Every structure is written in structure tokens, then in C-alpha cells.
Image (spheres, grey):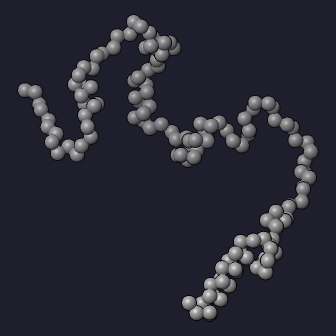
Amino acid sequence: MNTFTRIALVSAAASTLAACGSGGFLNRERPDEFAVQRQAPLVVPPDFNLVPPAPGAPRPAEGTAAEQALEALFGGPAARSSVETSVLDRAGSSEPGIRSMIGSEGTNTVAKGSVTRDIVAAPEGDGATAQAVIPG
């Protein structure tokens, strides 16, 4: 190696090492990130006759969580279609204790058998080897 290459390598290493330190000839003043933005002045509200909200009451502008979800997903509650209304009218209302009756020990259940268990446990595929059998 010649002298010029050695001097260039030493100066590059020295400047790289100096850049890592906090002092030295490459040190520069940096702005304080907390002092860059000015704080807005405090403003006194114009109306002092505001009534504090009742504890536990929903905020007047927000509504319930269900209303917020409907608004976010669908743009607000939609009217039921005539088909949906007809189905609900035909179904009627359920008995008040229906959930406890379904979960009782006296409720009869249907054993699905091995066919359903085989269908649920079947591996996923593209259906190329699937067959349909129509009993005759």
C-alpha cells in the first residue's frame, strides 16, 4: 500500500469514529424536540352556565355502542325489508324461558352418527375425486 491510501484509510476511520462521539470536530447543535412546537394559549370557555353530566349517563353526542357500530358499518340503522318483516311475523315470539328449557337435562338431542363425524373430519381438497350418490 502506498502512503496516500494509508492516509485516506486513517482519515476515514478517524472521521467515522469522531462521528460516533458526542464531541469533536463533527459535533453540531441539534434542536430540542420538545422546544420546537409552541403550546397553544389556554382559552376560557364563553359559557359558565353548563350543567355537569349525570354520573353514568351516556354522552349526548355519542349514543350507544350498538348505534355507533351500525353507523360505522352500514351508515346507520336500515328499515327491515318486507320479506324480513314477514318472516319475523310468521315466526312469532319465543317463550320467556326458552334458553333454560333448551339447556335442561330433559331435552332430547339427535345423535348425528359416524357419517357426520366423517364429513367433518374429512381432509380439505379440490373436489376432483368427489362423488354424489342418489339413492334410488
Q: Is residue 96 in view from this perspective?
A: yes
Q: In the picture, residue 14 is in which quadrant?
A: bottom right
Q: In the picture, residue 6 is in which quadrant?
A: bottom right
> In the depicted view, which residue is nearer to us: 124 or 19?
19
Q: Is residue 95 in view from this perspective?
A: no
Which x, y percent locates residue 20?
Answer: 71, 71
Relative to 29, does residue 135 appear above or below in the rendering? above
Relative to 27, does residue 64 appear above or below in the rendering? above
Answer with left or right where residue 69 lies relative to residue 128: right
Q: Residue furthest top?
A: 106
> In the depicted view, which residue is nearer to us: 30 or 108?
30
Query: Residue drawn 27% across and 40% down?
Result: 124
Which x, y percent locates residue 9?
Answer: 62, 84
Relative to 75, does residue 12 appear above or below in the rendering? below
Answer with left or right where residue 91 lies relative to residue 50: left
Which x, y percent locates residue 19?
Answer: 72, 75
